[in-house]
Image: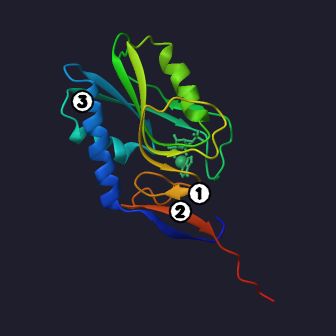
Amino acid sequence: MKPHRLVPKISYDEIQQKVRELAQQISDEYQGREVVLVGVLKGAFIFMADLVRHLSIPAEVDFIRVASYGNATQSSGRVVLKKDVECCIEGKDVIVVEDIVDSGITLSWLLRHLQERKPRSLKVCTLIDKYERREVEVPVHYAGIRIPGGFVVGYGLDFAERYRELQGIYEVEFVEEASTS
Ligand SMILES: O=P(O)(O)OC[C@H]1O[C@H](OP(=O)(O)OP(=O)(O)O)[C@H](O)[C@@H]1O
Ligand code: HPA
Ligand SMILES: [Mg+2]
């Protein structure tokens, strides 16, 4: 792993405030209905747990697991399905819960995949919408925090499987290796 340091970017309190706002918005818009939240593992596991506890409408919870980054800070461009959804989403109001939308490659793949199961509606909620590196145009119906770029970790997000446990969100800043000469 290249030498790096973490620079604080979004505090735990700010994240919690955004999660509450998103939950309120979703609860208002789906009033009187029931939703199926499909969390995208691994990154969305913490966001999903917080979001669902702030909803005031009935929600079924399911997970799908896809991966495309591995240990890198750039998408491989190849989305691998590791685990599919388990509940039947046909005819249901489905919301995909993502930790981050970056290139859009993962989300674009997921939307195509889930649409095949004929949900009644299919929307997207992401904690972070990182918009500068977008390669594929994707709909983002509910976005907590918009950032232009930078590789971020914490609150579920990883760099080579590290830092998911951090409460806040940090930017990874790569530093020069110390010269030995
Ligand atoms: O918009 P994109 O450029 O496709 O990036 C977004 C996706 O990449 C990350 O997943 P990753 O492949 O790292 O798997 P992980 O959630 O298990 O860390 C992240 O959790 C999103 O699902
Ligand atoms: O900035 C990021 N951090 C962690 N995982 C990611 N997957 C896409 N972008 C990112
Ligand atoms: Mg990752």
- What number is the disc on residue 171? 2
Residue 2 at x, y percent in the picture: 66, 67
For the residues labelled 1 and 2, the Cα–Cα distance comes to: 6 Å
Q: Are marks 3 and 1 in contact (CB under 8 Å)?
A: no
Rendered position, 16 above or below 85: below
Q: Quadrant of the N terminus?
A: bottom right
Between label 3 and label 2, give the one nearer the viewer. 3
Q: Work out whether residue 41 or residue 95 is closer to the camera in this orientation and state it.
A: 95
Find numbered disc 1 in the image and state the secondary structure of the residue it sits on.
loop
Question: Is the residue indicated by label 1 positioned so its CB lies within 8 Å of ligand 2?
Answer: yes
10 Å neighbourhood of mark 3: few (<14), some, or many (≥20)?
A: few
The residue tagged 3 is: 28
Earlier along the polypeptide chain: callout 3 or callout 1? 3
Find numbered disc 2 in the image and state the secondary structure of the residue it sits on.
strand
Residue beneath the point at 29% across and 52% down = 17
Residue beneath the point at 24% across and 31% down = 27
Amino acid bearing label 1: Gly
- What number is the disc on residue 5? none
Amino acid bearing label 2: Glu
Amino acid bearing label 3: Asp
